[in-house]
Image: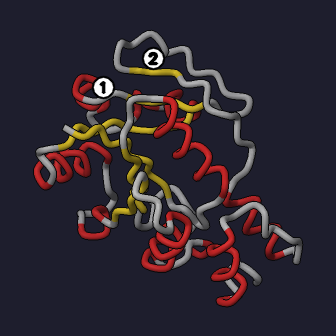
């Protein structure tokens, strides 16, 4: 059974912080492959700043390039909205019974994990690989046997910051993978 780490996100846009965390999980844990699960519109996020899901998936593919440790997934595009992680996991297990799935989440998500739909079932059947987040403390589930707190680099970079910087005409070419930067620039995304 291949051990797959699922990294969920809007990836609006994907940036070097995402890539560093994915690389860390594949290199420093027993996760063999990281799948970037591109989320359709998150009901908690304002839709106006969100690029079309296929454009965001394309940027993830540009970021991955020919690295076979990483894979993109649009599995949530066809699921009922809002997409709950528990439902996505059920679909993935049905479609890929030969794999074992774990979640890669930030410490901020761990702090609110008990609010997730069927979180106890997720925790019972899947490991959570947690990366640190700035100014975050998640004591509640830290001691659960399926919660693995990692020493991944602390990445204080966000897609929100990148979008704002592009709007403010700042150079963010080193904040995103080169192919992603070229695509963003060519398409004039986030400039208005």
Within the image, what quadrant is residue 167 found in? bottom right
Seen at 74% across and 43% down, the residue is 156
Which x, y percent locates residue 151?
61, 25
* CB-based contact (under 8 Å), mark 2 and mark 1: yes
The residue wearing badge 2 is 141
Q: Is residue 127 left or right of residue 177?
A: left
Q: Is residue 164 left or right of residue 154?
A: right
Picture quarter with the C terminus: bottom right
Closer to the camera in the image, 29 or 53: 29
Which x, y percent locates residue 107?
57, 30
In the displayed structure, 90 sits above or below 173; it is above
Seen at 17% across and 53% down, the residue is 91
In the displayed structure, 76 sits above or below 171; it is above
Q: CA distance from mark 2 to mark 1?
A: 10 Å
The secondary element bearing badge 1 is classed as helix
The secondary element bearing badge 2 is classed as loop
Q: Is residue 58 left or right of residue 46?
A: left
**Dot 1, how many residues are within 10 Å of its Cα: few (below 14), some (14-19), or many (20+)?**
some
The residue wearing badge 1 is 123
Seen at 67% across and 60% down, the residue is 159
In the displayed structure, 17 sits above or below 110; it is below
Which x, y percent locates residue 39?
42, 61
Seen at 45% across and 17% down, the residue is 141
Between discs 2 and 1, the one toward the N terminus:
1
Residue 189 is labelled as none
* Total numbered labels placed on residues in the image: 2
Which x, y percent locates residue 126?
28, 30
Q: How is the image coloured?
A: secondary structure
């Amino acid at each position: 059974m291949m051990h797959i780490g699922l990294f969920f996100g809007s990836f609006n846009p994907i940036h070097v912080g995402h890539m560093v965390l994915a690389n860390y999980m594949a290199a420093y844990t027993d996760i063999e492959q990281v799948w970037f699960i591109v989320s359709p519109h998150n009901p908690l996020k304002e839709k106006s700043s969100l690029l079309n899901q296929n454009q965001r998936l394309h940027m993830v593919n540009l970021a991955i390039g020919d690295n076979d440790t990483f894979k993109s997934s649009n599995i949530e595009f066809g699921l009922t909205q809002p997409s709950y992680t528990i439902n996505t996991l059920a679909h993935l297990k049905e479609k890929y019974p030969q794999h074992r799935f774990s979640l890669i989440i930030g410490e901020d998500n761990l702090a609110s994990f008990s609010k997730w739909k069927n979180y106890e079932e997720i925790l019972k059947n899947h490991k959570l690989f947690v990366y640190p987040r700035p100014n975050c403390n998640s004591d509640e589930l830290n001691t659960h046997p399926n919660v693995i707190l990692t020493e991944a680099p602390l990445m204080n970079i966000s897609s929100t910051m990148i979008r704002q910087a592009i709007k403010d005409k700042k150079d963010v070419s080193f904040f995103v993978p080169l192919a992603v930067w070229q695509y963003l620039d060519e398409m004039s995304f986030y400039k208005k």
